[in-house]
Image (spheres, rainbow, N blue to C red):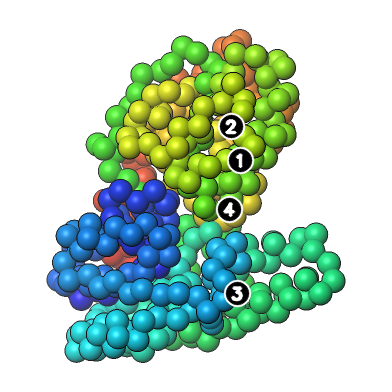
Amino acid sequence: MNILMISSFNLFAGTRFGGAKRLYLFARELQKNSDEFTLVYLDSCFEKASEETGKEFKGSISIDFRYRTHRNLNFLYPIISVLFKRDQIDYARKLLIAKKFDVILVSFPLALELFRTLDLKGSKLVYLEDDLALDTMKKNETGVRGIKRIWKRFRYFQLYGHMKKILMPFSAFLAITQQEKHEIERLFPWLDCRIIKYGINPSEYTTLPFKSSLFSLGFIGNYNHPPNLAGIQNFVHSFLPSLLEKYPDLHLHVAGKNANLTGLTDNKNMTIHGEVQELKTFYDEITFFINPIISGWGLRTKLVEAAAFGRPIISTRLGAEGLEDLEMSIAETVQDYLSIFNSVKTGRLDIVKMAEHNRRMVELRYTIEEQGRNLLSILSE
């Protein structure tokens, strides 16, 4: 099978974005199991590691782009304002048009626009997206009034119409949760929507020994991604002060790329680690991994990694979507956190058994080999 993959993200082992890491692992599996694999990618996360990408995926093609409007990722991809460098597009088209692809896999809205610009053909066209831009755009209208709301509505339908037109010849849409699947089937009813989850290589994640200190919480993410920033800001401002009144020894570890959390760094009960070179080092510092996500779609890849490291998880319901086979404690309020801590102290909640169960689930259902087989099966149908 001859596969072309068009990615909105730069794909390399050291990426710190969950969506990009998922695509990188898929690309590695596709390259390993196809007759010929070609990767064309943009760098919408602005990680600028193209030399690393080029080494791993032979013959990969990088395309630069810019926005006609001011680049604001909170504005969610003003697709029709994207400009690509003409010389790079002409070069890529010349290389790709000479090949016959059995399948073209396009991932995320920016790559969809690149696919349209390249004017490529394939016997099967498949689109992949999690953290749905359209739904997030709609939710951003909440609480907005007047002309601004009208403008946001216009931009939503503009993006929807644009995507609908490009997706007409596609046969399948790959989602990551059941909730996304329902929304996609409503928006694009002609597409065969399937669920492909996140997969990792468990051997790369050491199960860490349990820490005796109950009050060591941790969160890691890329804070250029608005849901991560909104989630940790809300936790620090709305939850942490009340938790510290009850448990003054509690400590919060915050790590990840672009962790310039203005106004959150003057708390002696917080440590801002910034970007960590080894995930294991961060997870070894904490007892619980918290996931206080309050916005955005998509499966939280960091929860799969936390489970692989043997760390019990406390999450919002939204943050836990798509991970129903993992055991985790759900917390929406301060009282929920206090109840969880009390249950652990009194022995009603065995977080060691919880962590052991989650590690087994990762090894059974969240390996990249398993998810890679599912992806290949869909692409080869």
User: Who comes first in sequence, dot 2 or dot 3?
Assistant: 3
Count neighbours of disc 4 (C-alpha within 10 A) and say few if under 14, some if 14 to 19, many if 20 or more.
few
Q: Secondary structure at mark 1?
A: loop
Could you tell me which residue is drawn at 40 percent across and 80 percent down? 84
Count neighbours of disc 3 (C-alpha within 10 A) and say few if under 14, some if 14 to 19, many if 20 or more.
few
Q: CA distance from mark 2 to mark 4?
A: 19 Å
Q: Nearer the viewer, mark 2 or mark 4?
A: 2
Q: CA distance from mark 4 to mark 3?
A: 24 Å
The three-letter code of the residue at mark 3 reads Leu
Q: Position of residue 61 (x, y in %)?
A: 25, 73
Q: Position of residue 312 (x, y in %)?
A: 48, 28
Q: Secondary structure at mark 4?
A: helix
Check disc 4 and report the residue beneath it. Answer: 226
Count neighbours of disc 1 (C-alpha within 10 A) and say few if under 14, some if 14 to 19, many if 20 or more.
few
Check disc 1 and report the residue beneath it. Answer: 262
Q: Secondary structure at mark 3?
A: helix
User: Who comes first in sequence, dot 4 or dot 3?
Assistant: 3
The N terminus lies in quadrant: bottom left
The three-letter code of the residue at mark 4 reads Pro
Could you tell me which residue is drawn at 36 percent across and 19 percent down? 209
User: Who comes first in sequence, dot 1 or dot 4?
Assistant: 4
Depth check, front residue: 56 or 368? 56
Check disc 2 and report the residue beneath it. Answer: 265
Asked if the residue at tag 1 contacts the one at tag 2, i.e. Cβ–Cβ closer than 8 Å, the answer is yes
